[in-house]
């Protein structure tokens, strides 16, 4: 993270600004792809309420990096269980 905030201090790591721009664009593109994949995953659950899906969509958009980790580590398993229990009880 410090590398992207102060690129001039890391000329030994990133000798050219063109490389810096390529790296920063690559990281931003990967974060956008990750966010899109997680939002599609949230909306793929058929038996989860729309309000939960909407809340997690906004959280993933607004607080992407931190929220994506929380979603992946904790909330995805909870939504799978909710989706399966509602589906099995029907």
Image (cartoon, rainbow, N blue to C red):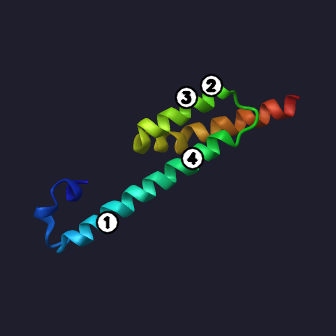
Most distant residue in the top direction: 51
**Residue carrying label 1:** 23
Provide residue 13's location: percent of width, then percent of height: 20, 71
Most distant residue in the left direction: 9
**Residue carrying label 2:** 51
Q: For residue 53, which quarter of the picture?
A: top right
Q: Which mark is residue 38?
A: 4
Picture layout, residue 76 above or below residue 2: above
**Left or right of 31, for residue 1:** left
Sooner in the amino-acid sequence: mark 2 or mark 4:
4
Circle 3: element type: helix
Marks 3 and 2 close (CB-CB < 8 Å): yes
Residue at image location 69% in from the left, 27% down from the top: 49
- Report, in whole angstroms, how far the alpha carbon at label 3 lies from the one at label 1: 31 Å
Sooner in the amino-acid sequence: mark 3 or mark 1:
1
**Residue carrying label 3:** 55
Provide residue 73's location: percent of width, then percent of height: 53, 43
Sooner in the amino-acid sequence: mark 1 or mark 2:
1
- Report, in whole angstroms, how far the alpha carbon at label 4 lies from the one at label 3: 13 Å
- Report, in whole angstroms, how far the alpha carbon at label 3 lies from the one at label 2: 6 Å
């Amino acid at each position: 993270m410090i590398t992207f905030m102060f690129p001039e201090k890391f000329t030994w790591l990133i000798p050219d600004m063109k490389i810096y721009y390529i790296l920063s664009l690559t990281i931003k593109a990967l974060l956008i792809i990750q966010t899109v994949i997680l939002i599609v995953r949230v909306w793929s659950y058929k038996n989860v309420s729309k309000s939960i899906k909407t809340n997690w969509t906004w959280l993933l958009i607004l607080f992407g990096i931190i929220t994506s980790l929380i979603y992946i580590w904790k909330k995805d398993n909870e939504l799978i269980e909710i989706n399966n229990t509602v589906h099995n009880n029907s």
